[in-house]
Image (cartoon, grey):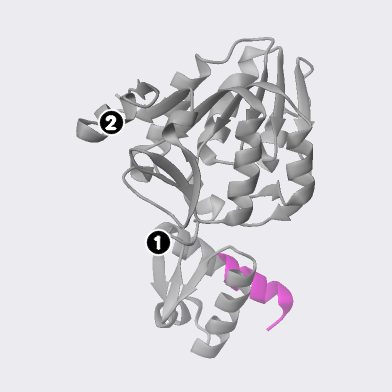
Amino acid sequence: MTTTGAEARRQIITEHVLKHGTASGAELAELTRVSLMTVHRDLDELARRGVLRRFRGGVSALPSTVFESNLDYRLGVNTAEKEAIAKTAADLVEPGTSVLLDDSTTALALARLLVDQAPLTVVTNARRVIDLFAGHEDIRLISLGGEYSHTHDSFLGVPCLEAVEALSLDMVLVSTSAMDARMTYHQEQDVVLVKRAMLASGTRKVLLMDRTKLARTALHRLAPVEDFDHLVVDDGVGGELLTSLRERTDVRVASTG
């Protein structure tokens, strides 16, 4: 099969797994009408690119304590909650200030709202946020360079760290993959290092978290909840967890209604 055919098949596999969360090798072989051996080669390549995660007998787009989901998968889940959180967070941002947005899908939802709150200085390592603000005359856009990550569609690594450490910003708005009542977490060390540097660069720190990320942990600790000036969650968070979080920081609850 030609390279073009292989790429088309891998796109079909990717779209199927992003839609369903997981799939077996046999299921994907039937879907694409190729041999199981060919499917396994496709899955090896997609895993190498960070698009999907291999497990025994199949492949997954779902997060775990040691693997983060691909950006395309995260863009398609919990969209109402992310949009509500973004709307509430946008009220914290004042025109004329400098803000840093990380490469999370919730920050991308926020970026779409901030286009109308110019003038702003926006700093980001997220390619899609860069594309969103590029060309807006009233937005001063600073792109953080680094090594490109297919999984996150953003820039990470030492060059990104060094660029962040050279800045001092009015507000930093980030999300991460997991948190409990005391601590925030992420699966990947490179992401943790960049997010820590981002938080250190900001006068005010805002954490954006939908309910699916709460009461969970991941491999690496990011920062204590009390290090954030504000936490914005959706109205699916409540009970003892919400009470505990409010003991540690200012919590804003976004309505999804």
Residue at 53% from the left image edge and 40% from the top image edge:
105
Which one is in front in this view, the residue at disc 2 or the one at disc 1? 2
Label total for image: 2
- Per the rendered image, the range of residues in magenta is 1-11
Q: Position of residue 131 (x, y in %)?
A: 72, 35
On the question of residue 234 being in view, the answer is yes
Q: Quadrant for the C terminus, please.
A: top left
Q: Nearer the viewer, residue 51 or 28?
A: 51
Q: Position of residue 80 (x, y in %)?
A: 39, 33
Q: Quadrant for the N terminus, please.
A: bottom right
Q: Which mark is residue 95?
A: none
Q: Position of residue 11 (x, y in %)?
A: 58, 65
Q: Nearer the viewer, residue 106 or 64?
A: 64
In the displayed structure, 56 sits above or below 71; it is below
In the displayed structure, 91 sits above or below 155; it is above
Query: Residue under circle 2?
Result: 244
Upstream in the sequence, badge 2 or badge 1?
1
Packing grade of label 1 (10 A; few <14, some 14-19, many >=20) is: some
Where is residue 197, by image quadrant? top right
Q: What amino acid does circle 2 point to?
A: Ser
Secondary structure of the residue carrying numbered label 2: helix
On screen, residue 4 versus residue 213, left or right, reads right
Residue at 38% from the left image edge and 33% from the top image edge:
81
Q: Position of residue 69 (x, y in %)?
A: 49, 56
Residue at 46% from the left image edge and 47% from the top image edge:
185
Query: Residue under circle 1?
Result: 21
Q: What amino acid does circle 1 point to?
A: Gly
Q: Nearer the viewer, residue 8 or 249?
A: 249
On screen, residue 250 versus residue 97, left or right, reads left
